[in-house]
Amino acid sequence: MAKKRVTLFWLHDEERDAVLPLLSSIVGKPTQSFAVGDIDENDIAKAEAAGAIVQEQQPPPVRRVAPSPRQSISAFGFAMAAAPVPAPDEGVPAELDYYALDLSVPLIEDVRNALQTAGATIMEALPEGGYKIRAHAGAIAAIRSVPGVEAVTWIAPSSAAPKVAVLAAAPAGAEQQPVKMVAWDARLHDPTDVSTIVTWLGQQHLTIAGSGVRKVRFYAPPNAPVLDDLARRTEVETIEQYVPPKLFADVARQLLGADAATAVGPAPGVALDGSGQIVAIADTGIDQTHPDFTGRIKLAIARGRANDASDPEGHGTHVAGCALGDGTASGGKVKGMAPKATLVFQSLLDDAGGLGGLPVDLNQLFQESYDAGARIQNASWGNSGSSVYAINSEEVDEFVYNHPDMLIVVAAGNDGSAAAPQRSAAGFVDWYSIASPASCKNAITVGASRSSRTDGALSASTWAQSFPSAFPNDPIASQNISGDPNALAGFSSRGPCDDRRIKPDVVAPGTDIAAARSSLAPVSNFWGPYTPDPAHYAYDGGTSMASPLVAGAAALVRQYYTDVAKHQPSAALLKATLVNSTAWLTGADATAAPGGTPSYHQGHGRVDVSRAVPNASRPNFMLFFDDNYAAGAGLAKTGDAARFQVTVPAGIDELRICLAYTDLPARGLQNSLGLIVQLGGDVKKYTGNQNLPDAPPPPDRDNNLQSVRIPTPGAGVYYIQVMANNLLKGPQAFALVVTGDSLTNFAPY
């Protein structure tokens, strides 16, 4: 009888006791939530019948001598790989170098301890499976002998790296042309090596723009030999060309459920309007004279122009209006999502019209607003990309990991296109166009749906009329840009990310959005004038508009937690609450191939604040949550689990459960948690994101945002387990949200 290496997951001790005897051998010790071992093929069905989730061990990836961790195909088409220095031969590792480690088991404590004893320093998890380790050459044999180790492969120079040519000299007598200098970002394996690389670059007489946690930005010609020299240094993981980010340029409140949720507050004396919440927006500039912001701008920081935070471009003022404009100039007709929230604005516009106010390291930008008291930050800009996890994506993840109570909201990008699709059907928007830093893990990434507007700006225009090169074919070509709120904006960037993660996370209206207009910005900078009051408002569109609508919605949710629940929420809790609220869009483009829930097109759906937190529009709506992110809180080691239960009455429309957590910064999940839900007395189990498109068998190993939705659930006690499938570094905190009508008795068990 053939045997298979499997992981058996369970929810109850009696399930554990029933399935463990089916394993003919067990690797290490059984954990609280699973065991790894070998099983006869015929016994897999028995394990499933006993209630176990069976996950077959996948073979390790086929690694080249130069696997992907040392090679970066950037969003801008430049590939560069690092190689060891000093080494007399590029085919020989340095004495202390980096390796890809493949295991046949999760990183359980027995294996972790044995690897460390053998001399492996585990650096990060690799998205295709395995780990990046650092080790001395003399320790490799001992590491390979650790039980559970499948392979140890040196991370060597990549044969796919571009050949660097020496710049040709100008012909005799020709006019000497200045050498074009390009900005580059070198990302290092270890933050402690930043000073070493800064010193080395200085010795090469290169200008250094600045440095970050494990990044150095410098200037060099595009094909200078020094790029190859730098890439060969052991300290360097990737080199990316830096391209400056660009902008992702009344009805919306209704579509997002804000009007229903805020008509009457969730508790006596509390109105959900953003009161007491500080939202930061980093964008072009802000019109501080606009009536819709009077008395609510805490700070306007001029980062791009000396002592000038004004907005001649208009993008930043419109974005701020979407998030928190109070509608004063329109008599309350054109309002943002959180009309009483306070604004911290960081003006990025420089004298050349770019976003020169962005720092070398985004951590510095977010720290500035965090120190000003903001706990929600909007970023409606980024680099056009192909769903690549770039250096600035990692910087977003770094900041949230180190400041777990700061929610960053990022526009997905406007690179959606149905021209010459590679994966989608003709007339449908193609995949893999998420921008960076929207490809990060720890922010909430927002795509754009269509608004319901049928008049004004581009609402009556078709996609082919307004964007002919991007949408040349039906069905999308002949559809109106606005009017169908169940459809997506054609330009909205689609996922997934290059490590299989779902993006965008959510969507919000992003076509023909009316919001505040800067008095310095010409109407030609917008989609069109807002005819009832063109001096104060304009229509615009893009994920730039969708993102601040969600940032404003987050302010309403955060206000509920701080003022009603008396809890200071983590970013993960806000993220889980917003995702748990979403409405699934049914338009053909929103549900296009490859389908799945969540999907590459709309993520988890469109935010609906009326289903996020208790409010008068849903009098029986109940919200329970668990959110402990204090230092040392969370699941300590691989296999640990936290268990909860909740009582569900008969006759409710849906039970919703969402898990979110803030992961370590690096490409792909570093700490993998899973979600399992089961009705007591029923063997059937629901797993987080169990209907993902093109996904390996559950539990989900790719996403730090997972949901379970059970329509018309049976009455009874539901058991919920959050488990540590694999932890690179513990403890791992998490946020869990449970919602539904008339729920009771939520508690750990």
Image (cartoon, rainbow, N blue to C red):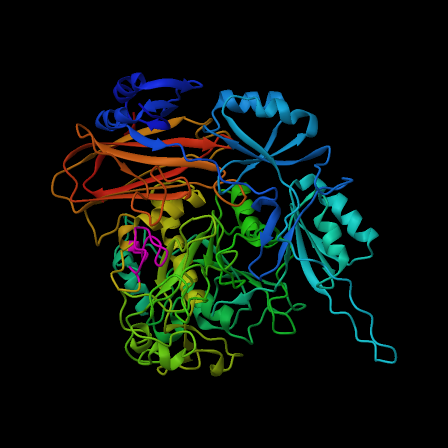
Which residue of the protein is positioned furthest toward the left in this rendering?
Answer: 651
Which of 272 and 702 lies nearest the eye of the viewer?
Answer: 702
**Image position, residue 312 (x, y; %):** 56, 76
Please tell me whether residue 606 belongs to the stretch shown in magenta.
yes
Q: Is residue 58 left or right of residue 680?
A: right
Q: Is residue 529 visible?
A: no
**Image position, residue 428 (x, y; %):** 34, 67
The magenta region covers: 590-609
Q: Residue at x 49, y 59 (%)?
A: 386
Q: Is residue 469 visible?
A: yes
Which of 6 and 576 lies nearest the eye of the viewer?
Answer: 6
Is 700 located above or below residue 331 in the figure?
above
State how many labels appear.
Answer: 0
Which of 474 and 436 lies nearest the eye of the viewer?
Answer: 474
Q: Is residue 691 left or right of residue 58?
A: left
**Image position, residue 466 (x, y; %):** 39, 80
Q: Residue at x 50, y 20 (%)?
A: 110
Q: Is residue 239 left or right of residue 554?
A: right
User: Overall secondary structure of the magenta stretch?
Assistant: loop
Q: Tell me where residue 35 sits by quadrant.
A: top left
Which of 357 and 142 lies nearest the eye of the viewer?
Answer: 142
Is 315 located above or below residue 439 in the figure?
below
**Image position, residue 363 (x, y; %):** 59, 50
Is 339 located above or below residue 68 in the figure?
below
Q: Quadrant of the N terminus?
A: top left
Q: Quadrant of the C terminus?
A: top left
Which residue of the protein is positioned furthest toward the right in this rendering?
Answer: 173
Q: Tell me where residue 151 sits by quadrant.
A: top right
Please tell me whether residue 32 belongs to the stretch shown in magenta.
no
